Image: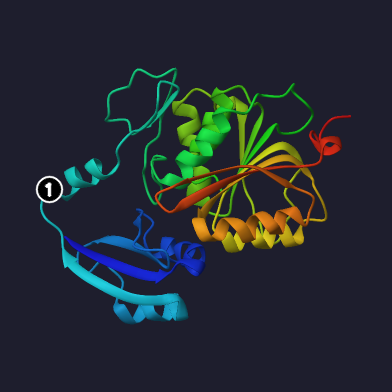
């Protein structure tokens, strides 16, 4: 078994991931190496893995480097050890199916599968911490929560289990759509979550009282720039390095949002952004 690490610039990582998934339908592994570099790892035999030339043509100028290595026979065991449970006090746990359930009020089971994790990354855990403090509003027409860039569905499923229903989960990656639907079924909330493919750069985000946006800073900035005004009651924006939090906060402030809270951990940050009081529930009425 061989491991092929594709190291790319973080600003272009989402586009690279979409391209690599065409070459690795069985999935790949994502690791943040530093503030500027993301590595995507593909596994397989030498015959199964794409050539260096094909990868250079595919990734283009985003490529930083390629790393080849052999994988030990116990790599599947070590892969499982990489996906550890996330436990937020006694309130919430997110775990892969092979881990025992912790003693928390809410326990989510997420299969990391393909290119997605179980929510243990700081950007997801910060989103969950802010979500835990949000009170579910009265049900309105349309979604109560939108999970923008749903990945494996951790945030959408947590929102539904916390009573923020109905939930709309959106992602541009068809593998994310499938993973979210499967994980929603495992956690008993499939009927509460609508899942569909969505292009943030080409479609407007539907209005909702709360939007969970665990995205890279360039996508958040592009969304803020395209937004005509405060169309959502609150936004939890994550996926940010700490130094990216301030420019993202300013970008949404120009659209009428006020930063109410900022959390930071391990060099990452998440923002709670709130619309003016008269737009606190854009779906009301």
Left or right of 96 in this view: 152: right
- Examine the rendering and report whether any part of residue 217 can be seen: yes
Q: Is residue 6 above or below residue 112?
A: below
What is the x, y in percent for residue 145? Answer: 66, 35
* Residue at image mark 1: 74
What is the x, y in percent for residue 177? Answer: 53, 45
What is the x, y in percent for residue 96? Answer: 33, 34
Q: Quadrant of the C terminus?
A: top right
Left or right of 100 in this view: 63: right
- Going 48% across and 37% down the picture, which residue do you hit? 154
Q: Is residue 238 above or below residue 31?
A: above
Q: Nearer the viewer, residue 254 or 92?
A: 254
Left or right of 15 in this view: 115: left
What is the x, y in percent for residue 248? Answer: 63, 57
Q: Nearer the viewer, residue 226 or 132?
A: 132
Which type of secondary structure does the marked residue at label 1 adopt?
loop
- Examine the rendering and report whether any part of residue 152 can be seen: no
Left or right of 211 in this view: 171: left
- Going 26% across and 67% down the picture, which residue do you hit? 4
């Amino acid at each position: 078994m061989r491991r092929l690490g594709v190291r790319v610039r973080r600003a272009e990582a989402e586009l690279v991931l979409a391209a690599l998934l065409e070459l690795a339908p069985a999935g790949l592994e994502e690791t943040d190496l530093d503030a500027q570099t993301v590595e995507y790892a593909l596994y397989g035999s030498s015959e199964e893995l794409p050539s260096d030339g094909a990868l250079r043509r595919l990734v283009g100028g985003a490529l930083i480097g390629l790393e080849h290595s052999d994988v030990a026979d116990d790599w599947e065991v070590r892969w499982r050890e990489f996906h550890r449970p996330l436990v937020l006090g006694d309130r919430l746990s997110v775990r892969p199916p092979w881990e025992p359930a912790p003693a928390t009020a809410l326990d989510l089971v997420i299969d990391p599968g393909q290119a997605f994790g179980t929510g243990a990354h700081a950007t997801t855990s910060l989103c969950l911490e802010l979500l835990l403090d949000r009170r579910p509003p009265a049900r309105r027409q349309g979604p109560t929560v939108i999970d923008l860039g749903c990945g494996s569905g951790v945030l959408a499923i947590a929102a539904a289990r916390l009573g923020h229903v109905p939930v709309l989960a959106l992602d541009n990656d068809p593998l994310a759509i499938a993973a979210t639907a499967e994980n929603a079924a495992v956690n008993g909330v499939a009927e509460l979550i609508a899942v569909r493919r969505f292009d943030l750069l080409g479609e407007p985000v539907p209005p909702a009282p709360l939007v969970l946006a665990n995205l890279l800073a360039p996508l958040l900035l592009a969304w803020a720039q395209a937004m005509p005004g405060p169309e959502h009651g609150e936004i939890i924006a994550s996926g940010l390095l700490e130094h990216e939090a301030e420019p993202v906060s300013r970008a949404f402030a120009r659209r009428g949002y006020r930063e109410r809270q900022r959390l930071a951990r391990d060099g990452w940050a998440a923002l709670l952004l709130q619309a003016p009081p008269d737009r606190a529930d854009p779906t009301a009425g």
